[in-house]
Amino acid sequence: MLARSTGLVAIPQELRSEEAAPILCAGIATFNALNKSGAQAGDTVAVLGIGSLGYMALKYAIRMMFKVVAIGRGKAIAADTQTLGAHIYIDNREEDAAILKRMGDAQAIVTTIDHAETVSPFWPASLLKAD
């Protein structure tokens, strides 16, 4: 295999491949999304879909000093997101997407789901306008 050095990372001997795999897959996907979003430290960033990718996105967003809004389904997830450091949890089964809009929307929304009916209510109107 040939690869650019910028695309490689050394894995410490004490870290098993199974333990490193999420960092290299979900970690790269979510980090790049946040890093390229244009959001700055202190900006509100929402993570929509709190599963494997969502947990990675939360961890990175918190470390990047964003005000993090976690959006998921169910009350059981709320405690997990708060333990990870999310500032706000929105249960999209119980709460309307307008809550994010009342907060002033988010500078970036990282969505880990592909269900348009779930995602579109959270999207800022400014991003939905056709050019």
Image (tube, rainbow, N blue to C red):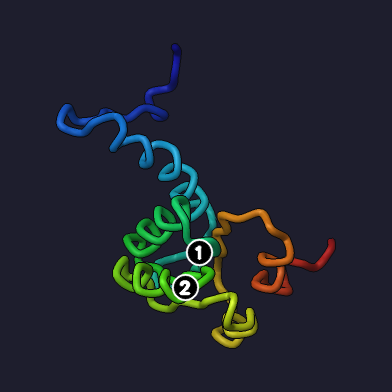
Question: Mark 2 to mark 1: distance in Å?
Answer: 6 Å
Q: Which of 122 and 33 is in front in this view?
A: 122
Q: Mark 2 points at which residue?
A: 69
Residue 120: image location, x then y, percent? 71, 67
Q: Residue at x 59, y 76 (%)?
A: 93
Q: Mark 1 points at which residue?
A: 47
Left or right, 64 with respect to 124, comes to left
Assign the C terminus to one quadrant of the image: bottom right
Badge 2: residue crowd in 10 Å (few <14, some 14–19, many ≥20):
many
Q: Which residue is drawn at 44% across and 19% down?
A: 3
Assign the N terminus to one quadrant of the image: top left
**What is the three-letter code of the residue carrying label 1?**
Val
Does label 2 or label 1 sit earlier along the sequence?
1
Q: Residue at x 42, y 69 (%)?
A: 77
Left or right, 97 with respect to 62, comes to right
Left or right, 7 with respect to 116, comes to left
Residue 123: image location, x then y, percent? 67, 69
| Extreme residue toward the right, this view | 131
Q: Which of 6 and 80 is in front in this view?
A: 80
Q: Compared to 46, does 87 lie above or below?
A: below
Badge 1: residue crowd in 10 Å (few <14, some 14–19, many ≥20):
many
Label 2, secondary structure: give it: strand
Could you tell me if the residues under marks 2 and 1 are in contact, i.e. CB atoms within 8 Å? yes
**What is the three-letter code of the residue carrying label 2?**
Val
Residue 60: image location, x then y, percent? 37, 56
Left or right, 26 with respect to 126, comes to left
Q: Which residue is drawn at 56% across and 73% down?
A: 106
| Extreme residue toward the top, this view | 1
Residue 26: image location, x then y, percent? 45, 44
| Image quadrant assignment for residue 81 | bottom left
Q: Which of 121 and 67 is in front in this view?
A: 121
Q: Compared to 69, does 35 lie above or below?
A: above
